[in-house]
Amino acid sequence: MMAVDGSMTGAEMVVWIEQRLLDAACTLAALPAHGLRPSSKGASWGDTLMELEDLLTLTGSDVIRPVIPSAAAISQMDEALEWVSWITDAGQRRVVLFWMMVHPISRRHLFSWRDIGSRMSVSHVTAKRWHSSGLAVITRKIFGQVNFPLSKCSKMQCF
């Protein structure tokens, strides 16, 4: 991971933020979703998440579950999810949140740019541009660059 200091270019800053948002999305997807509603009669033994060592000994018939996120990963996830709230434009924020929906094991995005554009009733090109603009808002806020150029962000090939 690159150092977060003044030596990064604008493109590197955006890539760093994008990676932190992806890591946050993967951490959120790996958190257990059981036990969120009142349960009926039954045993209090819930499902457990697997440790990394257990994943290495799986056979084809075993159920695969994501690795338990560390406390540090959860703290970083909380920080990165707060960044998304800085995006004031609702369309840009929704596109960034759609992009953050990932599979907990494969880390693949659940929606393609065309799917995101379709759900937002815009073209996939517009969805990508809104995503880039949303990342630029976060970049400006974190790195204090008031004049961060949106044109460079939207033309980057890293998305």
Image (spheres, helix red, strand yellow):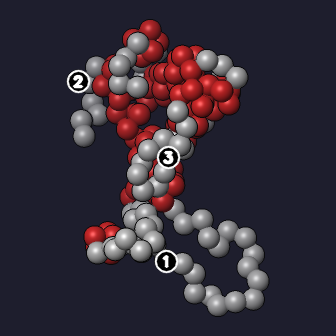
Nearest to N terminus: mark 1 or mark 3: 1
Residue at the spot of label 2 = 7
- On the rendered image, what quadrant is the N terminus found in? top left
Residue at the spot of label 3 = 102
> Is 138 positioned to the left or the right of 9 in the image?
right
Please report the residue visible at 61 percent of the width from the left and 17 percent of the height from the top.
Answer: 123
Return the x and y of residue 93 as percentages of the image width and height.
Answer: 61, 30
Q: Quadrant location of residue 3?
A: top left
Secondary structure under the numbered disc 1 in the rendered image: loop
The residue closer to the viewer here, 129 or 13, is: 129
Residue flagged by tag 2: what amino acid is it?
A: Ser
Is residue 1 at all visible to an observer of this figure?
yes
Residue 155: image tag:
none
Residue flagged by tag 1: what amino acid is it?
A: Thr
Q: Residues within 10 Å of mark 3 (few under 14, many from 20)?
A: many
Nearer to us: label 2 or label 3: 3
Residue flagged by tag 3: what amino acid is it?
A: Val
Q: CA distance from mark 1 to mark 3?
A: 21 Å
Residue at the spot of label 1 = 48
Secondary structure under the numbered disc 2 in the rendered image: loop
Nearest to N terminus: mark 2 or mark 3: 2
Please report the residue visible at 54 percent of the width from the left and 78 percent of the height from the top.
Answer: 47
Q: Quadrant location of residue 6?
A: top left
Q: Residues within 10 Å of mark 1 (few under 14, many from 20)?
A: few
Q: CA distance from mark 2 to mark 3?
A: 31 Å
Above or below for 4 versus 57: above
Nearer to us: label 2 or label 1: 1
Is residue 147 at all visible to an observer of this figure?
no
Q: Quadrant location of residue 60?
A: bottom left
CB-based contact (under 8 Å), mark 1 and mark 3: no
